[in-house]
Each structure stands twice: as structure tokens, then as C-alpha cells.
């Protein structure tokens, strides 16, 4: 894409190439290994729920590292996401209606 834009061609040094390789191996590669291990341990449905928690973790990092303000929208959205994941995994149970009592009791 660079030849078609007004940008200069990037100069790739050994340090830059090594950094990209390390990020690919450690960041992406390790994440895939852990994710597929998680699928093997808990199943695909539960492992896929991890993807819904990523925005919650990103907001938490933004608050802690970048000092972003915590608003009611963030808290409400985080609770909705966590409640949805818990419900989808069967960890959040609604109280069951009592069984109908037999007549005459």
C-alpha cells in the first residue's frame, strides 16, 4: 500500500524486524496457545465467552493506567456484559417457580 501513498517507504532495521517477530510470537502466538488450551479445558462455548470480557478488561486498563474517568455508563455496561456472560454460561440462575401444590393440601 505504501507505493500508492505519499508516505516514505519504511526503513526496516534488524531491531524493528526483531520487535515485530517477538510481538508476533509472544503476544499473538502465546495468546493462541493459551486460548486453544482453554478450549480444550473448558469447552468452546465457555472459552468464547472470554471475547466478551475483553472490552471490560480494556476499560479497566484505561482507568488504571491512563487515569480515564469512571462513569456510570462504564459501570452499567460492565455489569451488563458480565451478567450476560454469566447467564450464557449457566452461572446465573433465576429462581424457579414453586411446583403447583396438589389440591386438598
Image (cartoon, rainbow, N blue to C red):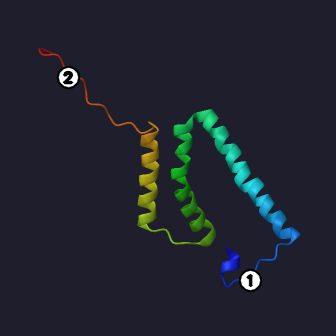
Q: Are marks 1 and 2 in contact (CB under 8 Å)?
A: no
Q: Which mark is residue 90?
A: none
Return the x and y of residue 95 as percentages of the image width and height. Answer: 32, 34
Most extreme residue toward the right is 14
Across the whole image, how many numbered discs are drawn on residues? 2
Q: Nearer the viewer, residue 11 or 71?
A: 11
Residue where numbered disc 2 is placed:
100
Q: Residue at x 76, y 54 (%)?
A: 26
Q: Residue at x 17, y 16 (%)?
A: 102
Q: Quadrant of the N terminus?
A: bottom right
Occupied quadrant, residue 98: top left
- Circle 2 sits in a helix, a strand or a loop, which is it? loop
- Circle 1 sits in a helix, a strand or a loop, which is it? loop
Q: Earlier in the sequence, mark 1 or mark 2?
A: 1
- Left or right position of 54 against 104: right
Q: Nearer the viewer, residue 8 or 54?
A: 8
Q: Residue at x 81, y 77 (%)?
A: 11
Q: Which mark is residue 8?
A: 1
Occupied quadrant, residue 39: top right
Most extreme residue toward the left is 104
Return the x and y of residue 85 as percentages of the image width and height. Answer: 46, 45
Q: Against 76, is 48 above or below?
A: above
Q: Against 42, is 22 above or below?
A: below
Crowding around mark 2 (Cα neighbors within 10 Å: few <14, some 14 to 19, many 20+) is few
- Left or right position of 75 against 101: right
Q: Nearer the viewer, residue 10 or 95?
A: 10
Most extreme residue toward the top is 104
Amino acid at each position: 500500500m505504501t507505493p500508492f501513498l505519499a508516505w516514505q517507504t519504511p526503513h526496516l532495521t534488524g531491531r524493528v524486524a526483531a520487535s515485530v517477530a517477538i510481538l508476533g510470537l509472544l503476544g499473538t502466538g502465546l495468546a493462541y496457545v493459551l486460548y486453544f488450551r482453554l478450549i480444550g479445558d473448558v469447552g468452546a462455548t465457555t472459552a468464547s465467552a472470554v471475547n466478551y470480557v475483553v472490552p471490560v478488561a480494556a476499560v479497566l486498563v484505561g482507568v488504571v493506567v491512563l487515569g480515564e474517568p469512571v462513569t456510570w455508563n462504564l459501570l452499567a455496561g460492565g455489569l451488563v456484559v458480565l451478567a450476560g456472560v454469566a447467564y450464557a454460561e449457566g452461572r446465573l440462575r433465576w429462581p424457579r417457580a414453586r411446583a403447583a401444590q396438589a389440591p386438598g393440601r
